[in-house]
Image: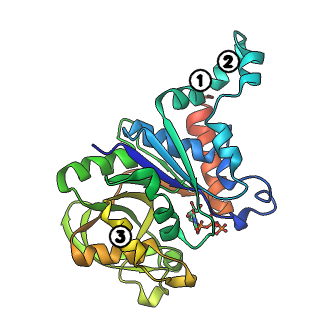
Amino acid sequence: MIRKCMFPVGGYGTRFLPATKALPKEMLPVVNKPLVQYGVEESIEAGLNYIGFVTGRGKRAIADHFDISYELEHQINGSTKEQYLESIRHVMETGVFSYTRQKEMKGLGHAILAGETLIGNEPFGVVLADDLCVNEPGEDNVLAQMVKIYRQFRCSIVAVMEVPTDEIHKYGVISGELMKDGLYRVSDMVEKPDAKDAPSNLAVIGRYILTPDIFEILRHTPPGKNDEIQLTDALKQQCQDGVVLAYRFKGTRFDCGSVQGFVEATNYCFENIYQQGDNS
Ligand code: UTP
């Protein structure tokens, strides 16, 4: 029912300079796997096999990563090193990849509108790969949890988490009415508010399910905070016209767009995934 997932990967990743001067930040490895692959694996596991990247200049390594490397395949075919390609081979076999470019970086809303051509007129997921999400053992991953909610409510859904007051200015923040455990009907959204203006401590993270009317709204959304076209502003419009839900997901999210979050994710993945024997 939801088949497609959009990955806006156009951002410059300035917080990781100089590492990101020639390398997309989405290709930085968390232990032995590029950040973006974690997000793509989450999407495919949630049943969203059609992966659409909205890229920018200097991001070609992402397309190469999800394509066959004939030379490498030839070199290690039949050797013990083949095990290291297991996870990416699985992703390449199950995923269908398409790409478009955002010509100018005018914000997340602008990136999503640029990705319309990859989605068409159907509901879709959005993953911001900088947010690495891990689920509790035996639980669905975050996107899969959201797909289940979509099946019931058929509207846009944003993933939220509680954040401390001194960090609220980094996020889109919702206010809403609690419908049932962990699920809110959104009444307002503000992008990166000052702590004193924040309507709650529930911050939006990089997982969304969007209904396709968002594209028409984005076409008419003027630049907002930081002079960028903000997805938050379009979602606010969508919740005024209809229903948008916020879901307090089960699991842990690492902010890999920041150096500290990236190091925390690396330590977590090393201890809980790599050392447990899953080294592909
Ligand atoms: P960020 O706010 O983290 O920006 O974007 P950034 O440029 O990637 O990183 P810094 O702040 O310079 O270090 C959040 C997400 O939105 C995407 C980014 O790729 C990232 O996944 N994005 C943002 C776009 O695709 N296009 C844009 O114009 C802006």
Neighbour tally class for label 2: few under 14, some 14-19, many 20 plus, Cα within 10 Å: some
- The answer to whether 190 is drawn above or below residue 17 in the figure is below
In this figure, which colouring scheme has been used for the structure? Answer: rainbow
Residue 149 % position (x, y): 24, 52
- The answer to whether 67 is drawn above or below residue 123 in the figure is above
Residue 48 % position (x, y): 39, 41
Foreground pick, 76 / 96: 96
Give the side of residue 277 with respect to residue 123, left or right.
right
Foreground pick, 263 / 89: 89
Q: Determine which of the numbered discs, if any, sits on residue 86 in the image.
A: 1
Q: Earlier in the sequence, mark 1 or mark 3?
A: 1
Give the side of residue 118 with respect to residue 60, left or right.
left
Provide the secondary structure element on which disc 2 rests.
Answer: helix
- Please tell me which residue is depicted at 68% across the width and 64% down the height of the picture: 12
Provide the secondary structure element on which disc 1 rests.
Answer: helix
Amino acid beneath label 2? Glu
> Ligand 1 appears in which quadrant?
bottom right
| Occupied quadrant, residue 126 | bottom left
Q: Determine which of the numbered discs, if any, sits on residue 82 in the image.
A: 2
- Please tell me which residue is depicted at 39% across the width and 44% down the height of the picture: 141
Neighbour tally class for label 3: few under 14, some 14-19, many 20 plus, Cα within 10 Å: few
Give the side of residue 220 with respect to residue 280, left or right.
left
- Viewer can see residue 33: no
Neighbour tally class for label 1: few under 14, some 14-19, many 20 plus, Cα within 10 Å: few
